[in-house]
């Protein structure tokens, strides 16, 4: 598959999506969304892939929507069509059965920040900057920023970032819980692949269930979520990997998981 805005490759069981619109600072446009959607469909149908990394260049992850396309939007119905499409594709990342890691170097602003938040894990290089500056041009985030940001860092901190539009650096993003880890720029991809490697060594079906329970449960009341968790816990006792995991623990050896 050939793409104009994204580089895609597989390294064993790890897929790497690299945003590649250098002249536009990886700004998000319709072509990019279409290509990302095609790649996500390809990943969903590839059972060999166990984890996915999304990254950009050293200077920029992504700076949000392409203002050239935004300026061409004349009516609310057109804005709705664009933002709904972006939400749909970002939701595919969040709802994917596979774990996604955002490896962020440089600027992650607007839709770029939102793209990183759709991923399960965010690893930031020391030069990373995160922000939702949409208010400064008279709009709000439309690809999940008003919803995922409060869920990640809490209501108060999220409102501050959304109301001011000011960015935060990597260390502040780590302090407030927006990113999982901060690493040197040159170590970013190595750290992302190291974490992805940990994921693919886990029993695959159990990892899928874990992601599903966390994502679904956060939108339930506590008692409903606990009941849901219990049923999924029970379900895993029908898998070969659960039996192998317990047996390996008793026998003091490494388990050999078969993802079933």
Image: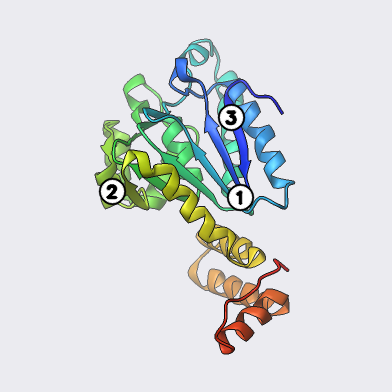
Q: Left or right: 160 with respect to 112? A: left
Q: Residue at x 43, y 21 (%)?
A: 25
Residue 4 rendering spot, x and y as whole percentages: 61, 20
For the residue pair 220 and 192, the one nearer the viewer reads as: 192
Dot 1 or dot 3, earlier in sequence:
3
Q: Can you give x and y, in whole percent of width and height, for residue 78 in the image?
A: 59, 19
Q: What distance separates the C-alpha of mark 1 from that of mark 3?
A: 22 Å
Tell me the quarter of the image containing the N terminus.
top right
Q: Is residue 189 left or right of residue 242?
A: left
Q: Residue at x 47, y 54 (%)?
A: 194
Separation of residues labelled 3 and 2 (CA atoms) = 37 Å
Cβ atoms under marks 1 and 3 closer than 8 Å: no
Q: Nearer the viewer, residue 119 or 191?
A: 191
Which of the numbered marks, if any, corresponds to residue 7?
Answer: 3
Image height check: is 32 above or below 92? above
Name the residue that disc number 1 marks.
95
Quadrant hosting residue 210: bottom right
Pointer 2 residue? 156
Q: Give the colour scheme shown.
A: rainbow
Mark toward the viewer: 3 or 2? 3
Mark 2 vs mark 1: in front: 1
* Front in this rendered view, residue 187 or 50: 187
Q: Nearer the viewer, residue 247 or 81?
A: 247
Q: Quick one: label 3 or label 2, which is nearer the N terminus? A: 3
- Give the answer, above or below, for where 18 lies relative to 14: above
Q: Is residue 201 something that shows in the picture?
A: yes
Cα separation between marks 2 and 1: 26 Å
- Label 2 secondary element: helix
Which label sits in the foreground, 1 or 3?
3
Query: Element at badge 3?
Result: strand
Q: Residues within 10 Å of mark 3 (few under 14, many from 20)?
A: some
């Amino acid at each position: 598959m050939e793409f104009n805005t994204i580089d895609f490759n597989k390294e064993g069981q790890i897929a790497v999506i690299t945003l590649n619109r250098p002249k536009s600072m990886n700004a998000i446009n319709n072509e990019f969304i279409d290509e990302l959607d095609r790649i996500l469909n390809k990943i969903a149908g590839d059972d060999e892939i166990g984890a996915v990394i999304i990254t950009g260049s050293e200077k920029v992850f992504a700076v949000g929507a392409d203002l050239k396309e935004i300026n061409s939007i004349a009516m609310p119905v057109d804005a709705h069509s664009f933002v709904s499409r972006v939400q749909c594709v970002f939701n595919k990342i969040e709802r994917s059965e596979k774990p996604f890691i955002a490896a962020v170097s440089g600027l992650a602003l607007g839709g770029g920040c939102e793209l990183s938040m759709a991923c399960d894990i965010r690893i930031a290089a020391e030069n990373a900057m995160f922000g939702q500056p949409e208010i400064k041009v008279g709009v709000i985030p439309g690809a999940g920023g008003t919803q995922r940001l409060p869920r990640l860092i809490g209501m108060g901190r999220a409102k501050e970032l959304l109301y001011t539009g000011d960015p935060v650096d990597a260390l502040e993003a780590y302090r407030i819980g927006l990113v999982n880890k901060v690493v040197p720029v040159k170590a970013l991809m190595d750290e992302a692949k190291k974490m992805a490697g940990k994921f693919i060594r886990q029993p695959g079906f159990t990892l899928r269930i874990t992601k599903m329970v966390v994502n679904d449960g956060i939108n339930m009341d506590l008692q409903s979520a606990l009941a849901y968790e219990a049923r999924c816990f029970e379900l895993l006792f029908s898998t070969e990997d659960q039996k192998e995991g317990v047996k390996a623990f008793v026998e003091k050896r490494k388990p050999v998981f078969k993802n079933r």
